[in-house]
Image (cartoon, rainbow, N blue to C red):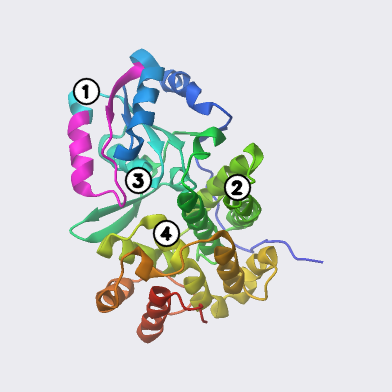
Amino acid sequence: MTSSLFQPEFAYSAAPQRVVFASGAQTQVAAEIANLGRSRALVLTTPEQAAAGQSLLAAVGGAGAGHFAGATMHTPVEVTERALAVLQDLQADCLVAIGGGSTTGLSKALALRTGLPQIVIPTSFAGSEATPILGQTEAGRKTTLTDPRVRPTVILYDATLVRSLPPHLVVSSGMNAIAHAVEGLYARDRNPISSLMALEGIRALAHALPNLTSGTGQDHDWGEALYGAWLCGTVLGQVGMALHHKLCHALGGGFNLPHAETHAVILPHAVAYIEPAVPDLLRPVAAIFGTATAYEGLSAFAARIGAPRRLSDLGLTEANLPRALDLATANPYWNPRPIEREAIAALLARALAGDPPQP
């Protein structure tokens, strides 16, 4: 009989957050603004999703104060400052973000500076909307912080909105979400509830993503993928990060590599590095994918759904490796296996070339 996930000692904090899953949930935004006691919402999007932002602004009618369409990946501080000036000029009293992790990041950065409540409508599987974590980039370095002020107040999950997600973002943002859950399974401050959520989130995405990438996905599959992303993001908001996220933050902040794609490439390599130190904690992941090890399962799954496999395809070069290594090993996050510089150098070289992950 399989043992439970019980731990003799743990702490669990429930997130004070309203989460709604519903087809057409975006139509509820005006009501959610009113429920918060607010009346002047600033709608946030990337430039690419500006039309969606304008449509949403029109839908909320008099509850909309304006629209800022400048969100971009890695949440540069200078973009946040421009958005803050717009927010103050419009005298907005709440934030409505529609988009992926870039837009959610900008909303969080504004909430940190203003204390305003946020309504987030995700259009990808990033999962960051479920966390109190904010990553910001300034002068070529990405730093992260955890603060309850940046956790969105309301999340509206609408499967109809992700159906137009480009196939490469379905894959990469799905792998990004899985990474949150996998890392949560061996986090120093993990707990049985976060582990339950992590495994359920991985199962949901492992089931849904192949259907979505094969072109046979139905409404249920899109909804299941959003469900998995929410669970995985909730896990990330419960526990600390380790090597995988450190590597992705170093590469994203240092070289402006695309966030989700970098997660997709790094995940099997980071897990291969860590798995020998915590094989029991990662055995359930191997079982989900039907492989002997978690890293082999993740690598095979990435290949099956067509995930990015090489950092070189994302813009990193061999000449970048020395600086990447310095960024990856400076101020390391807690990790189950000690950070060994030569081993991390080999890991980055394999990820650059797309070679198979190795323990």
Question: Is 173 drawn above or below residue 149 in the view shown?
Answer: below
Q: Which mark is residue 102?
A: 3
User: Marks 1 and 2, how far apart in space?
Assistant: 43 Å
Residue 231, position in %: x, y? Answer: 56, 48
Marker disc for residue 160? none
Give coordinates of residue 300: x percent, y percent.
Answer: 59, 69
Q: Residue furthest right?
A: 1
Disc 2 to disc 4, C-alpha distance: 20 Å
Give coordinates of residue 27: x percent, y percent: 49, 22
The Cα–Cα distance between marks 2 and 3, rounded to whole angstroms, is 26 Å
Mark 2 and mark 3 residues within 8 Å of each other at the beta carbon: no
Q: Is residue 331 at least partly visible in the picture?
A: no
- In the structure shown, which secondary structural element does the residue marked by tag 1 occupy? helix
Which tag, 3 or 1, sits closer to the chain's start? 1
Percent across and percent down for residue 36 are 42, 23
Q: Residue at x 19, y 28 (%)?
A: 88
